[in-house]
Image (cartoon, helix red, strand yellow):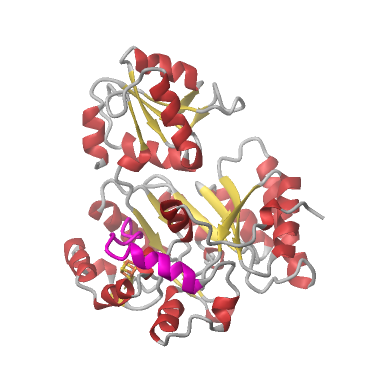
């Protein structure tokens, strides 16, 4: 359901977004843009440290209070809890509230996202999008997608390589929440400036070169993580900071070491499934029937087995439709965030959004991707849908050294 329609359905009632994390904050921003003055908005959250606080101008209620308001038809609850969504929905049903009439899940809402990759490459080889171009792209995006939910500023590059990144973040925040994903290997001044700009979310991922928790690069990474931790300890830090660890077959040592560091600093460490990035390579392997290639051996799951399961879902829609467009530093538009090539159009600023969507719908590349069932190759989704275990190891469950 589009944001505007959703806000109409809740009528005069107050909107309560249950979940004051990144997901809830993005939803609140998206929906508030369509709220008429009579709509009071607030969060609910079970985290006792948040209850009573104000986040992005919205008070945080105890969920019990939100339930009471919904029972009196004074509020509509939108559950935005990610992994704990199901439990919250069951709890609301159990107290007699009606799904659809008194509450719903964020999954029912349209949540369009976009990627603007503001820089590519490193050092002298880096290509960056000028801040003035970025602003034009941002405004066109907002006009093309009025209910834009979130922007990712990284894509295939590390945005910290862009020296105007703090300015870019400052231009973005009044328009839409944004995420900066970084390997955190830049100079410390750049890291401090970006933290001060307070992107909505900062996601840290370990650089690919670090295979062991040792050596010069590891030391740089640890020192830079310390800077982030210091910033986070400041009371006023409004950025949601998390560490995303992509899991491969042989990266247990780095998994343990980074988890230990994050636990020490109170940074949330999240394990994610590692893939062969970008999907351009995976498609090549499929086409050449080389599913046992060295890249596939690095995965914590079997590419062959996963594709066999994905094949069963081949007729289902592509999983990444929601994230579009993907715009590169030269303003060319990519087909989706999984592939680097092909580009749909050389310049986002010179094409009408409807024409861009048509180009995507008729793209030959999508047929090739779907032919191999790669549009359904999402390990978490496959495991959930088919109730199977594709990932073999789970370092996050191993004890720290
Ligand atoms: S079908 Fe494949 S290439 Fe096309 S948008 Fe989906 S994942 Fe990307």
Q: Is residue 318 above or below residue 226?
A: below
Q: Position of residue 206 (x, y in %)?
A: 64, 64
Q: For this rendering, which residue is in front, 92 or 304?
A: 304
Residue 315 drawn in magenta:
yes
Q: Residue at x 21, y 30 (%)?
A: 8
Residue 322 visible in the shown view: yes
Q: Position of residue 144 (x, y in %)?
A: 23, 55
On screen, residue 399 versus residue 83, left or right, reads right
Q: Residue at x 50, y 37 (%)?
A: 84
Q: Position of residue 165 (x, y in %)?
A: 51, 60
Residue 327 visible in the shown view: no
Q: Residue 52 is drawn in which quadrant?
A: top right
Q: Residue at x 69, y 60 (%)?
A: 255
Q: For this rendering, which residue is in front, 320 or 91?
A: 91
Q: For this rendering, which residue is in front, 268 or 298?
A: 298
Q: For this rendering, which residue is in front, 187 or 5?
A: 5
Q: Is residue 292 above or below residue 160?
A: below
On screen, residue 397 versus residue 326, left or right, reads right
Please state the total of marks drawn on the protein image: 0
* Quadrant of the drawing holding the N terminus: top left
Residue 34 drawn in magenta:
no
In the displayed image of the protein, which residue is found farthest to the bottom?
288
Please tell me in which quarter of the rendered image ligand 1 is found.
Answer: bottom left
Q: Residue 312 is drawn in which quadrant?
A: bottom left
Q: Residue at x 78, y 53 (%)?
A: 400
In the displayed image of the protein, which residue is found farthest to the top?
72
* Quadrant of the drawing holding the C terminus: bottom right
Magenta residues (range) = 303-324
Q: Position of residue 267 (x, y in %)?
A: 66, 46
């Amino acid at each position: 359901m589009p944001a505007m329609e959703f806000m109409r359905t809740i009528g005069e009632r107050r909107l309560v977004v249950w979940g004051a994390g990144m997901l809830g904050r993005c939803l609140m921003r998206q929906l508030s843009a369509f709220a008429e003055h009579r709509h009071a908005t607030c969060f609910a959250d079970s985290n006792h440290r948040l209850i009573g606080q104000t986040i992005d101008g919205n008070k945080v209620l105890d969920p019990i209070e939100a339930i009471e308001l919904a029972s009196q038809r004074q509020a509509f609850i939108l559950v935005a809890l990610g992994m704990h969504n199901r439990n919250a929905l069951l709890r609301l049903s159990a107290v007699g509230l009606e799904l659809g009439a008194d509450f719903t899940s964020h999954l029912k809402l349209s949540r369009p996202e976009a990627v603007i990759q503001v820089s590519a490459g490193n050092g002298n080889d880096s290509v960056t999008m000028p801040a003035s171009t970025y602003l034009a792209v941002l405004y066109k995006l907002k006009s093309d997608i009025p209910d834009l939910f979130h922007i990712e500023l990284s894509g295939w590059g590390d945005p910290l390589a862009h020296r105007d990144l703090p300015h870019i973040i400052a231009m973005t925040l009044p328009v839409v929440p944004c995420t900066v994903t970084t390997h955190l290997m830049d100079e410390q001044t750049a890291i401090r400036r970006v933290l001060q700009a307070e992107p909505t979310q900062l996601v840290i991922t370990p650089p690919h070169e670090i295979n062991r928790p040792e050596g010069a690069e590891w030391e740089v990474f640890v020192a830079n993580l310390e800077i982030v931790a210091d910033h986070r300890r400041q009371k006023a830090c409004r950025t949601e900071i998390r560490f995303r660890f992509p899991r491969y077959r042989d990266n247990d040592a780095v998994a343990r070491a980074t988890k230990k560091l994050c636990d020490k600093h109170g940074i949330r460490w999240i394990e994610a499934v590692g893939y062969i990035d970008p999907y351009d390579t995976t498609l090549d392997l499929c086409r050449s029937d080389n599913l046992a290639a060295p890249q596939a051996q690095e995965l914590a799951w079997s590419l062959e087995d996963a594709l066999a399961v994905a094949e069963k879902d081949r007729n289902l829609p592509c999983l990444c439709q929601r994230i579009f467009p993907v715009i590169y530093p030269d303003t060319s538009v990519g087909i989706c965030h999984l592939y680097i090539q092909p580009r749909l159009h050389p310049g986002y600023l010179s094409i009408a959004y409807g024409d861009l969507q048509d180009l995507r719908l008729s793209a030959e590349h999508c047929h090739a991707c779907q032919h191999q069932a790669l549009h359904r190759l999402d390990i978490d989704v496959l495991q959930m849908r088919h109730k199977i275990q594709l990932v073999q190891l789970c370092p996050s469950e191993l004890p720290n050294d």
